[in-house]
Image (cartoon, grey):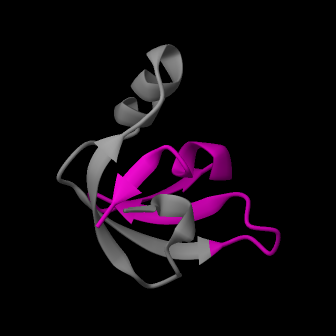
Amino acid sequence: MRTLNEIRPKETVKIVKIGGTGATKRRIMDMGLIKNIEVTVRKVAPLGDPIEVTVRGYELSIRKADAELIEVI
């Protein structure tokens, strides 16, 4: 299973699991990143942090640490 931070730009994947606990997991889910949603990686910063994704029709930048908690297929 891959995590969102391993996905290359212009690749579309489906979220299968959100890791983490408590406030971290809630914050990720509040941004619209929930199970069974398709996500497209738009850009990755030169040093790998942050990662810009398109989810539900809008662009979102997330930290690499948060992207590591999101399992995708």
Is residue 6 a member of the stretch shown in magenta? no
Identify which residue, 16 or 51, lies in the foreground. Answer: 16
User: Residue 68 appears at what percent x and percent y?
Assistant: 55, 50
Looking at the rendering, which quadrant does residue 45 occupy?
Answer: bottom right
State how many labels appear.
0
- On the image, the x and y values in percent for residue 35 come to 22, 45
Q: Nearer the viewer, residue 19 or 55?
A: 19
Give the position of the N terminus as an image quadrant.
bottom left
Q: Is residue 15 above or below residue 42?
A: above
Task: Give the residue drawn at x 40%, y 38%.
Answer: 31
Q: Residue furthest top?
A: 22
In the picture as drawn, the residue positioned furthest to the right comes out as: 47
The quadrant of the picture occupied by the C terminus is bottom left
- Name the outermost residue toward the front: 1
Residue 60 magenta-drawn?
yes
Q: Identify the residue shown where x is 46% and y is 59%.
A: 3
Q: Is residue 56 left or right of residue 20?
A: left
Q: Which residues are magenta?
A: 44-73
* Percent position of residue 32, x then y: 32, 42
- Where does the image place residue 7, in percent across and percent down from the top left? 49, 73
What residue is shown at x 61% (from left), y 62% (from top)? 51
Q: Quadrant of residue 10?
A: bottom left
In-image side of 43 versus 7 (left or right): right
Q: Residue at x 47, y 61 (%)?
A: 4
Residue found at the very far left of the displayed protein? 36
Is 70 located above or below residue 47 in the figure? above
